[in-house]
Image (tube, coloured by chain):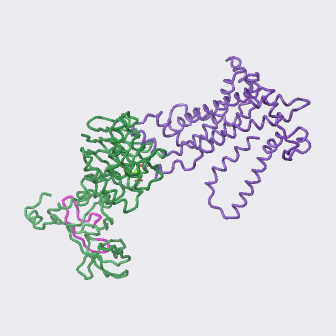
Chain colours: A purple, B green
Amino acid sequence: MLNKMTLTMPWSGMNKLTLKPDLGKKLMVHAVLLTYTVIALFPILVILINSFKTRKAIFNDPLGLPDASSFTLVGFEEVLARSSFDVFFFNSLIVTVLSLFFVLLFGAMAAWALTEYRFRGALFIAALFAMGIMIPIRLGTVSILQLMVDLDLVNTRTSLVLVYIAQGLPLAVYILSEFIRTIPKELKEAARCDNVSEYKIFFQIVLPLIRPAMATVAVFTMIPIWNDLWFPLILAPGESTQTITLGVQQFIGQFVTDWNAVLSSLTLAIAPVLVLYLVFSRQLIRGLTAGAVK
Amino acid sequence: MADVQLKQIKKSYGQVNVLHGIDLDIKHGEFVVLVGASGCGKSTLLRLIAGLEDISGGELLIDNKVVNHQPPAKRGIAMVFQSYALYPHMSVFKNMAFGLKISGKDKNFVREKVEHAAKILQIDHLLERLPRELSGGQRQRVAIGRAIVRDPNVFLFDEPLSNLDAALRVQTRVEIGKLHKDLDATIIYVTHDQVEAMTLGDKIVVMNKGRVEQCGSPLELYRHPRTQFVAGFIGSPKMNFMKGKVSVKTEGSIYVKLADGVEVEARVESGAIAVGEEVTVGVRPEHLQESLHGEGRLKGKINLVEHLGEVSYIYMTLTDGSEVVVRGDGETEVKVGEEIYADYQPQNVHVFNAQGLAFKRLTAAEADAPAAAMIRQAAGGNT
Ligand SMILES: Nc1ncnc2c1ncn2[C@@H]1O[C@H](COP(=O)(O)OP(=O)(O)OP(=O)(O)O)[C@@H](O)[C@H]1O
Ligand SMILES: [Mg+2]
């Protein structure tokens, strides 16, 4: 459900591309966008309001707002008291942030190398990354599990971070390459004339200029990782390494589901991604290269 | 001292040969202007000197050392790009200081240096701004400032003024000229602009299709273009060209019969010319005078008159259909559709053979002083 949030992203970036349409067209576009926003936000809204309601109220009137008689915090109390919510939360956060950091760093570095330098095997590496975009990493789950067993990494957060880096890298390289290609080559040449080393060109000139693209990639990378249930379940199901999506599952039973707890933990789980999203979206400054050339 | 020497410099991109062996000798402190049609390899040559591209053949010497395989930073050059290429996320100060800072210079030294350069270029009040908050001319000056602070031996400018409006162009051109005197540095400057080339250059290099067509002082190129290409390139408006056949040949002067029957006299070294040879005659618009009376030698119909104030340019079509531009009086009263005559001095006429090579015009002194030419003729000449 959080995936929906990312979808508003490319649009906010693409607004600048639309060539002043006439009013009727504008209204149409906005109508479509608004409808989509409502559809996308609806489930989240339902989770939010129901997490503050008693179990009875949830079932009687799922869409009603909590009132004096139905308002309760029992779900939150339960989540915080009965489970090791803080551990799950911390696990999710550390796994997401670490994976994100490395995907961005390695993704940008690989993209820079592939676009800027000519070397033997460049095409092969680029093809591998392209394949990584097309083939879902889950197809390799069995071998990944075997590998992790051999490396003695099962039930560690490291295993998750490694898998997520592999999962996020191909798309990151692809998107960032496109952006790096748009940096005028004179900028790099000017820097080379200035005796700036290749590393410094990358870190001090290229990275700052692709910040908006990095933010886009960050959002695209972060949300699937935060929401993933598959790899935590397979690689790190232990009590101390569970992530929050896995942790929530303990409230969903075969016969009874503690809806208060489920909805409350989901509500709590939204918060950090929301914060990260806000952080990144602030980086999506337009026209960062304005003034560089011409 | 930073002499720059190019010896048979070649450049090819894969199968495509872009430069076919360029020889140039640039002395320390010289201001050399590269001109030539679009795509003839000016930028490529500049980038080879800068070290931004690999040299495919030949030798490049800066300060008498072969630098073919040295990175740009080691060559003691600074390049100012046509597109400015300022770092967009850094303030003006940081843009100018970046290179110095990277090379580990002391902070105060850097500040002093940048402020000094900013003062010269009159951008000292803009140091805290970002490039996008500057006008085109200011950006250009920041780009030049970034080059100055590094104290390079050789400045490379690639069409630095082409993005500026006319007024700013003139102003910046004057500034660059002053800068050259102040800095005592070698400058290699690419431009499309006639005026920039003529006013700034100690030496102009005319390039054509990856070769040096001619190289010399502005006046030399103007007076004695070695080929028809150079003749057409230097001077504005362009030199008029008319095809014809050599009809009479004497010592120190020939007559060329144009397609419409008019005979044009030219004072050129006639030794290598054969009567009947097909040649092209060239006369600059400023060497043609309009005259309403029949004594003029070229006759044509006016199809456009441009009044520029102090002068006017009269575009006329000769009877054989070729177009000729005449520089007329600023307040000329001639009208479109009228027939006029254009007069010229024989010593101002250039003649090119079928391959586009010029026959040497008798030197300015000889041509300007008919007496000298007569003495020469009397002595039998040496051709
Ligand atoms: N990377 C490249 N690969 C192949 N050909 C190139 C490359 N760069 C330049 N060329 C070719 O080299 C020739 C010279 O280019 P160059 O940029 O030096 O021209 P120029 O004289 O600077 O032209 P302008 O006045 O338009 O700037 C052109 O024909 C161009 O197509
Ligand atoms: Mg060029």
Across and down, in percent, residue B358 comes to 26, 59
Across and down, in percent, residue A118 comes to 50, 35
Across and down, in percent, residue A210 comes to 55, 42
Query: With respect to residue A198, does B39 lie above or below?
Result: below
Across and down, in percent, residue A35 comes to 77, 53
Q: How many labels sit on residues?
A: 0
Residue drawn at the location 85% of the way across and 31% of the way down: A252
In the rendered view, does B138 fall on the left or right side of A179?
left
> In front here: A19 or B110?
B110
Does residue B266 belong to the magenta stretch? Answer: yes
Residue drawn at the location 62% of the way across and 34% of the way down: A129
- Residue B355 visible, this orientation: no
Query: With respect to residue B83, does A265 lie above or below?
Result: above
Q: Give the range drawn in magenta.
A: B258-282
> In front here: A175 or B222?
A175
Residue that extends furthest to the front in the rendered view of this protein: A68
In the rendered view, does A290 fall on the left or right side of B112?
right
> In front here: B235 or A61?
A61
Residue drawn at the location 30% of the way across and 47% of the way down: B187
Find residue B293 and report its image quarter: bottom left
- Residue A42 visible, this orientation: yes
Q: Main secondary structure of the magenta part?
A: loop
